[in-house]
Image (cartoon, helix red, strand yellow):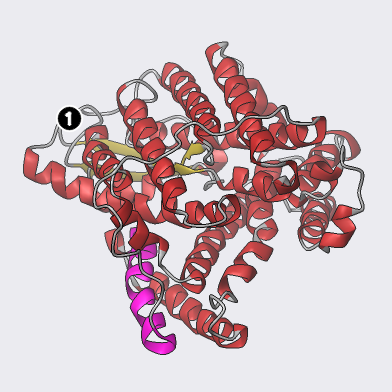
Amino acid sequence: MGNPIILWTVHSHHTPLDPPRGPAALKRDITMEFSYGIDDRPRPAPLLIYGLQWLAVSVPLVLIIGRVVAALDTGGSAVPYLQRLFLLVALVLLAQVYLGHRLPLVLGPATVLLVGILASLDAGSGAINASLVIGGLLLAGLAAAGLTGHLQRLFTPRVVAVVLLLIAFTLAPTILSLITDGGGTVPATQTYLFAVAFALILFAAHGFLTGIWKSTLALWAILLGTPIYIALFGAVSLPPADTALVALPEDLLAPLAVPDAGVLAAFLICYLALAVNDLGSIQSVGGLLGAEGMGERSKRGVAVTGLGNVLAGVTGVIGPVNFSLSPGVIAATGCASRFALVPAAVAIALLAASPLAIGYLESIPGPVIGVVLAYVMAAQIAAGLVLGQESGAVGTFDGGLIVGIPLLLGTLVAFLPPEVAAGLPALIRPLLANGFVVGVVTVLALEHIVYRRSPDRP
């Protein structure tokens, strides 16, 4: 999903910026200076260095979620799926930099859509792809009509905090499956012990590291965790010797099928959360940089995200969203230029054109991916808790119930035995077997209906 919106007072070396405006409860009074402003173009050498830093942040985000979905979507090699996903991310990122929000914002697969895909596998890939197309079209239409702001009225700070927590909690079964996956050769107990030790090291490193090292910790975890896993458990499957170095992904057009009402409704709820996350990410970076014309930037940015999701459905990959971790990367690098993302986007596109490179990325062990995904979700939980605390969302017993009940229900549904889910009517199965949807519907009902007149509303 993303992090809560935190705003800073900032100034650029090149252009003085006005202090950003935002919710008073979340505002931070920190003065920062950047080497390059939003529209400044760094010289070639600094541009390449900043681009590599953005690439180090972007690739793990695409790879982690892409690996999980590819394992569900393909019966054999995941290389073609990952090629299409990397290509989509590169194209949408360039579109955002030049046509959309025109801000230095990293982009990647939407975790909230992963939850929807996991709960809709029985419907088939055609129905899932069509749901992505419909959701993307609605999102782009809402943005073009200037209606996205109305969605924020539903998503109060308390609801957003629950959404952030729900995504992490309802992905717990997927994380558990990854960290116990020994590829058929390593006992699950051994991979589990490896994952626990590796996770403790990763979280300790997060506490000690600072700056760009902390921002790129997911990348270093993958680069160091893979050889450690190989040293402990033996070699992993590498791409075949005849894998092409350069080749475009095959089958760019994916199958489409009319989704049933339950699947479509589940995805539309996911897109409500995605829209608010996308809008919040754009506003957080715009506020950090004091960018002008934020209304138009937000409108165009969400519209491009919507169209990117349409393209994702057409090509059969998970849809993209702007990530709100970008302010931390900007603060760490000291560069606020949107053009620093262009070399990163080009490099991602080059990766998409190399089955051999993607094949090596696919060979990363499941337990390593699972631990890094757990690390990312832990950061998301922390963001939800911070937002809840700073907005006063859980200041009373009623507030705690509004947060706690949806989290408990969503987590229980996420661990629902497959035979129970299979026994539900097909029409409502995508709704009642989707922990995220159950949790979001519950928190919206509690916040806006049951406890609407509660005196502790933040």
**Residue 54 screen position, x and y as percent:** 28, 48
Which residue is more in the foreground, 33 or 90? 90
Look at label 1 and name its amino acid. Answer: Asp
Q: Quadrant of the C terminus?
A: top right
**Residue 254 screen position, x and y as percent:** 54, 34
Q: Does residue 103 appear in the picture of this structure? A: yes
Q: Which residue is mark 1?
A: 40
**Residue 118 screen position, x and y as percent:** 67, 51
In this view, which residue lies farthest toward the front? Answer: 242
Q: Main secondary structure of the magenta part?
A: helix
The magenta region covers: 214-234
State left or right for residue 242 relative to residue 176: left
Examine the rendered structure and indicate whether residue 207 appears above or below residue 26.
below
- Residue at 63 percent of width and 30 percent of height: 256
Examine the rendered structure and indicate whether residue 450 appears above or below residue 66.
above
**In magenta stretch: residue 226:** yes
**Residue 27 screen position, x and y as percent:** 48, 41
Q: How many marks?
A: 1
- Residue at 87 percent of width and 42 percent of height: 426
Examine the rendered structure and indicate whether residue 155 appears above or below residue 185.
above
State left or right for residue 338 relative to residue 41: right
| Number of other residues with Cα within 10 Å of mark 1, as a class: few under 14, some 14 to 19, many 20 or more | some
Q: Does residue 392 appear in the picture of this structure? A: no
